[in-house]
Image (cartoon, grey):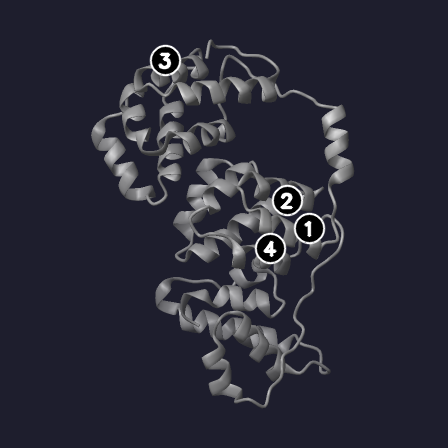
Amino acid sequence: MNFSWRRVGVRLGLKWSKVNMFNSNDTQTQKAAENMMNYWRSNLSSDIHQRKMLSTALKQHKLRKLAEELFGGEIGDENLDTQEGGKCFNDQDLLFICDQLDPESWRRLGVRLKLKWSDIKKIANNNRQVEDRIMELLVTWRDFQTKNQVPIMVKALRQQQLVGLARDVSERHGYSDEPEVAQTQTNKKYQTLEHGCLDDTDMLIISESLDNDWKYFGIYLGLKRSEINQIQSDFTPPTVDASIEMLVQWRERQKAEVNHLKTITEALNKVERIDIKEELESYYQNKYGKIEAKV
């Protein structure tokens, strides 16, 4: 199972938090996986077909060849799906999203789910495989988002232009957001913007439009070319993630009295991205109900 064994544990019905208790350094991966498998087996009820359950989990994990080597063709598939209705996710629901999520978009999905960029970077540093990073991110978000998990996730997936996955998640939970959309449109509440400060979701909006201009934009914001080259090395592809990292680094260096929005606007003038200025004007008007800097 190599380094992907933790997700196999979730497919077998174990919680991500429990699986992580067996996690260890790279040199002990085989032992950690063995301990997890022993724990899984010893905690199954006697009426469960262990071989069928394991065979199905391996096939779902794209380890069909291993399943066939272990059990041949004599073992049929077991229904391992334990999704819950309503507006909350269990770990297997999150694994369903993880399996279908584009590996290059997971950081941006985390930002849309209101996780801090600094926390997203920690998740990346603590997990070798991108799929494990996605699972850790989704579980971290779920554990702090106690209410309305499905509506929030569906909205974030749509914002990410993952319409098909948003539809699958909605159908999986029997969820329809039409009444909520109508209510939101009639009872709109604006967020508060203080002194032109920009949060991580604001940085995402800018980054998605910068494309290949992000490095020039960083120079105009005052970053050194060596810093930008290091960010490019650490975060590309995709360039959107590198752009977010650049903007967050810039923001963390600003003094409290600095109006982020005004400074960003001035840099956009220098890089001649009038299209982003117009997009920002519409975005801030919609989010905050006002424009605090001339865009």
User: What amino acid does circle 2 point to?
Assistant: Val
Distance between the Cα atoms at labels 2 and 3?
A: 35 Å
Which is in the foreground here, disc 2 or disc 4? 2
Which is in the foreground here, disc 3 or disc 4? 3
Residue 29 falls in which quadrant of the image?
bottom left
Label 2 or label 3, whichever comes before in sequence order: 2
Which residue is the site of mark 3?
266
Distance between the Cα atoms at labels 1 and 2?
A: 7 Å
Which is in the foreground here, disc 4 or disc 1? 1
Would you place residue 44 above or below residue 125 in this image?
A: below
Which residue is the site of mark 4?
94
Distance between the Cα atoms at labels 2 and 4?
A: 12 Å
Local crowd size for mark 3, using a 10 Å CA cut-off: few (<14), some (14–19), many (≥20): some
User: What amino acid does circle 1 point to?
Assistant: Ser
- Which residue is more in the foreground, 240 or 55? 240
Which residue is the site of mark 2?
154
Q: How many marks?
A: 4
- Residue at image point 43% right, 62% down: 24
Would you place residue 268 above or below residue 294 in this image?
A: below
- Residue at image point 25% right, 38% down: 230
Q: Secondary structure at mark 1?
A: helix
Would you place residue 206 above or below residue 167 in this image?
A: above
Q: Position of residue 50 (x, y in %)?
A: 63, 82
Left or right, 279 with respect to 250, comes to right
Q: Position of residue 213 (x, y in %)?
A: 31, 29
